Amino acid sequence: MLSGNIAVAICILYATLLFAVAFMAERRARLGRLGWLRSPLIYTLSISVYCTAWTFYGAVGSAARGGLDFAAIYIGPTLVFVGWFVLLRRIVRIGRAQRITSIADFISSRYGKSATIGVAVTLLMVVGTTPYIGLQLQSLTLSFEVLAAAGGDPAEGESTGVVAFWLAVGLAAFTILFGTRNVDVNERHYGVVTAIAVEAVVKLLALLAVGMFVVFSVADGPGDMLARIPAEMLAHEDAFGTRWATQIFLAATAIICLPRMFQVIVVENVDERHLATASWAFPLYLFLISLFVLPIAVAGLELLPASANPDLFVMTVPLAEGQQLLALFAFLGGFSAATSMVIVAAIALSTMVSNHIVMPLWLRLTQDQPQTSGDLRMVLLNSRRAAIAGVLLLGYIYYRLTGGSTALASIGLIAFAGVAQLVPSLIGGLIWRGATRIGALAGLSAGASIWAYTLFLPSFEGAFLLSADLLRDGPWGIAALRPQALFGWQGADPLVHAVFWSMLFNIAAFLLGSLATRPSWLERLQAQWFVAVDRADGAVPGPVLSRLATSEDLFLLAQRILGRNRAHAMFEETARAQGRTGGLPAPTVELTQRLETELAGSVGAASAHEMVSQIAGGGTVSVDALMKIADETAQIVGYSRELEEKSAELEATAAQLRRANAQLKELGEQKDAFLSQVSHELRTPMTSIRSFAEILRSGNGIDAAEARRFASIIHEESLRLTRLLDEILDLAVLEQGGVPLRRERVALDQVLDRALASTEGITAAIGMDVERRASADIAVATDEDRLAQVFINLISNAAKYGGAAPHLAIEVSNGGEMVHVDFTDNGPGIPEHQRERIFEKFARASAATLAGSAGLGLPISRQIMRNLGGDLILRARAAAGASFRVSVPAA
């Protein structure tokens, strides 16, 4: 039969097993036999430290109270690992490159390695995690009470407090033994991580075992279990509302910002590729561990009295069915869930406390005292051990003050809301170079203050700092300042209320503080590194400061933190790389930077930066060096942009030159063709004139009739030559605007009649059908002779280039200020690329049209119309043939 003594014995045996697992893993790591210790499976299982007693016990209680409300704590992390994988990878990459030791170290490094931000984040995380540790102690105590009650030995009052106290002591001892063996946090806690992986398997199997029992023993299979789920549980008023969305947001932020999650995801990561496996394996783990939450809650509501605690259904349902061994297995699962969280959280928080609070204070208090090898190493180890004990003590005090009366899920959400205050500074620092230290401090301070006032302190229910009267009436009786009805927002869920106001003030202060201040040079360098860490070429350099110190001073500092052996190894390696066979290496900038990076893995980036700066720069960083680096970076960026702009301009100019060259080449070809045609046109009549003139001058056997015929030919060819010369001169004069034009009111039909009569011989000879569409009597203001010349030219062209059965349609339309006359033929048409060329004086439609024409008709016609205030264009049309539009000003 189960009893309290059996429960204690089981806990001791299980803890012994975990000790053995951790000891074996540490021993393998020391021997260099890492193997499966560095596998992605171990890494993924360690991330399951997210699933604490809240998950194991509180999720069932949450399902019993609010239906599907519990699913939010699993959806949030799943969204991050699936949808924000790139963000996680960036954080891991930065953490590994800069030897980040904690979430406080990460944020302080981003903002110029600020010690102030490190302290602020550390204090917030200690306060925010305290409720969570209290939750674990509460869950362990409650589960112990269940086993004790099952054995007829109920534990109440002071006995439960004693149980919680000794549990805290035992967890502190385990954490100190395996969590503070190394000063360098980046050396990985293989023993702790492996023990957590074992606990992850145990708690998953325990919850699955209880779930299978409920589905297949309490119910008659999945179908029966689904039928037993009440409809109101699936459509509970708390599910899918503002509280549900708030929980998803908090769970998503917690997977990044919780100290224990940052520890296992970033600090304990040994290979960035393991994160790719975890991106699907961890959501699968969450799915499996949540699979039977709702069935267990339904079974508990059916089998147990209404007064039963829903948070303990995982154990009380098997006990109600007489399954004591299954209940004991569930107890071990809950024990695993709680202890793994406490261990990792204590390690993470102790690192933050020692690096950001204890170490800076120690350096200031002992800066004038003699320095010995390894003295700071012992300070670090002892401060972390003391911090572990202190963190667990705070969790125990919180548990005792709250009395353990609050639902487990509510306590967990209080902690989640606290750590969510890091999100604006963390995410903003990764994507915005303009985020500053002042902005981050302002956001953290504002958000944390609102969170503490509206959610954390009210969780004590008037037992700590805020009295019951103040919670009810507000300070000084001001209702608008009531903690849970701030600014008059009444009736809201306390969690939604607190998260809304805290995040609003946090983000606003972060943005305003960053916009109102200028970052320091070191902040700018760190910002450049953090924001550009994912550059495709992977060539983002770490910030290098022009600081130098003697090799002896650097070596002494290395010994104080790293110890004599490790310091010797590092300096000997550096000396060999410099080509020195003995002694210390030369005090280069690279040596100083490497030492700071090594120290950062032990004391954090902020403390390491301060230590190195004290001996390498008299406690200050060379502003000239920083300005030089920043100026060079800015110049490189500027040159790069200028080169890109110049390259684009050159490319555009080259394209224009190519087009101009092509046009010049075409114009040259057209000019050559024109000159050839003109010379041909001039030579032909001149040849005829010369030939017949020589015949007439010789007078050999020429009668009067032949003489008259030869003279007639000479006269006609002279007229032809004159017309051609007139045509060329006419175009030149028209272009210069030297031809006098007389504009008068003219009937358009009269001009068309004249043009058709003049071309009747040409159209009749080829049988061209001219369709003149009817139009009203329209008067235009123009030069009748010149307009008739344009019409004659268009009709002649239609006859010259018409189809096999030539057809010409003439249509008049009144456009208001302009009258349009369209000449549309059924010829081969004009290709798209020649539509504008036909109006150039050196161009013809094609080589086939060279004979009999100098190619000046259309250019002359367009120039005439433009001089008359109108225009001549070639209309676009889908059908075959060409369509020219003459626009004439209306009278």
Image (cartoon, helix red, strand yellow):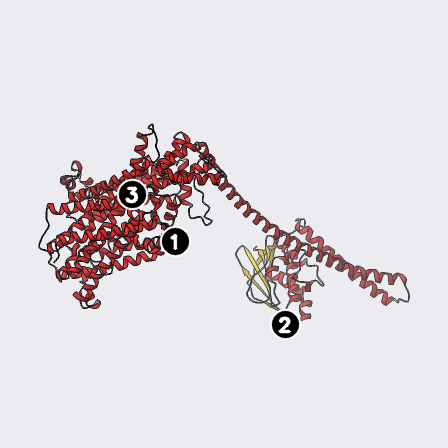
Which label belongs to residue 273?
A: 1
Secondary structure under the numbered disc 1 in the rendered image: loop
575 to 701, vertically: above or below: above
Seen from the viewer's position, the closer of residues 241 and 304 is 304
Seen from the viewer's position, the closer of residues 207 and 150 is 150
Are there few (<14), some (14-19), or many (20+) residues within 10 Å of tag 1? few
Mark closest to the chain's N terminus, 2 or 1: 1
The amino acid beneath tag 1 is: Arg
Query: Mark 2 — residue?
Result: 805
Give the CA separation, mark 3 to mark 2: 103 Å
Query: Where the C terminus falls, by quadrant?
Result: bottom right
Residue 335 position, x and y percent, is 21, 52
The amino acid beneath tag 3 is: Thr
Query: Mark 3 — residue?
Result: 180
Seen from the viewer's position, the closer of residues 580 and 622 is 580
Give the CA separation, mark 2 to mark 1: 78 Å
Residue 42 visible to an observer of this rendering: yes
Query: Where the N terminus falls, by quadrant?
Result: bottom left
Residue 407 visible to an observer of this rendering: no
